[in-house]
Amino acid sequence: MQLPEFKLERFFAEHEFNVSHLLCASDCEAISVESLLALEPEARQGLDELWLGYTESTGHPDLRAAIAGMYETIEASEVLVHTGAEEAILTFMNGLFEPGDHIIVHTPCYQSLMEIPVAIGCEVSPWQGREDFAWAPSLDELEGIIKPATRAVVVNLPHNPTGYLAPHALFDRLIEICREHGLILFCDEVYRGLEYDPADRLPAACDAYKNAVSLGVMSKSFGLAGLRLGWVASHNREILAAMANYKDYTTICNSAPSEYLAAIAIRHRDAVVGRNLDIIRGNLALLDDFFERFSNQLTWVRPKAGSIAFPRTAADSNGGTKLFGDLLEKKGLLIAPGGNFGHDDNNFRIGFGRATMAEALGVFSDYLEGVS
């Protein structure tokens, strides 16, 4: 399987640790091991005594039980732990599909959701979110894309890079469509728990539909990217078995310290995720003022969940490319042009899940004032 260059990851490899101000990170504010262990009085001793041998390939039972507790109907045996979300995407696509299968992918998107099935030999059709409809995709369009060879629909809700979150009615109809056509629904839910209004939170896809796979990770809502740990949950054990089989050719099993620390964070998810949601809400208030102040230069669809948004420049063509170059060269500030997500470069991703966002936004404001 030959894969093209991963644009976003090469972009971050070149720039992320070489700039003064990062305004496009997709994750939330991290915490230290010390802060995480403080959530449970006995956790430090448990970490000191942790056995550093091979772990269970499906994930430690305690971790799988903690993950299952985040869902309504999932049992621990219906969870498969991976090394990050990226590995889970890889095992899902390679474990389930073969050349000639047709996959529908919600776009713009994280590149691997589309490129891995293409590399396998699948036919891939984009299901486009529409900026003029607050980034909502069309269900009528989806039904028109489905064909006899269609095997799966891949969605990302809450959505990266736009912050779009489907209304309950759209989500329910999406599941009905998948059920009617016998399709697998792969739902990237890595920002679940970061809805600004709790009433907007969607059911986990794996709770709503037997042939759905829900993807989760410690890096986004939890802000614990350094643990490199993700998972899938599904009632369809044949899907899980196919993914587990492919995982035997990748990492085999996960890091014991990461699994131990992740279980602690999940058991205390209200505190860990709640802290990040507080940071996001504070930063959103700053962004509201920012986009109102510079409305002649930038527009945005205000997100409904997550720590990312996808603003647009007022320039006629590839304005995001020039803006990215100017900000990087003149201010040491990094934004992510839309081309990294298979979109045009008039849009660019910003991230606002970190405590340093206010400083970065101030630098952005100084630049815009200078060119207004």
Image (cartoon, helix red, strand yellow):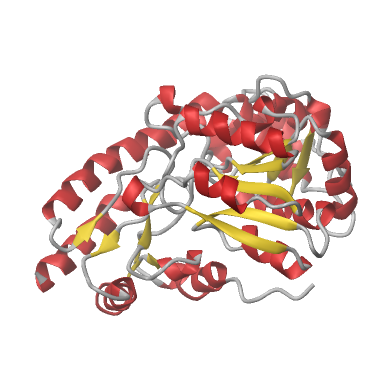
> Image check: 342 left or right of 294?
right
Residue 164 appears in the picture as rendered: yes
> Image check: 319 left or right of 175?
left
Residue 251 appears in the picture as rendered: no
Q: Quadrant of the N terminus?
A: bottom right
Q: Please give the name of the residue rendered at 36% of the width and 49% of the height, measured from the top-left corner.
A: 352
Residue 324 position, x and y percent, is 33, 73
Q: Please give the name of the residue rendered at 44% of the width and 42% of the height, measured from the top-left corner.
A: 306
> Image check: 224 left or right of 353?
right
**231 and 254: which is toward the camera:** 231
Residue 71 in the image: above or below residue 114: above
Q: Please give the name of the residue rendered at 48% of the width and 68% of the height, measured from the top-left corner.
A: 340
Instruction: Farthest residue to the top: give it.
Output: 72
Residue 174 position, x and y percent, is 58, 36
**166 and 368: which is toward the camera:** 166
**26 and 297: which is toward the camera:** 297
**364 and 183: which is toward the camera:** 183
**Quadrant of the rendered image containing residue 113:** bottom right
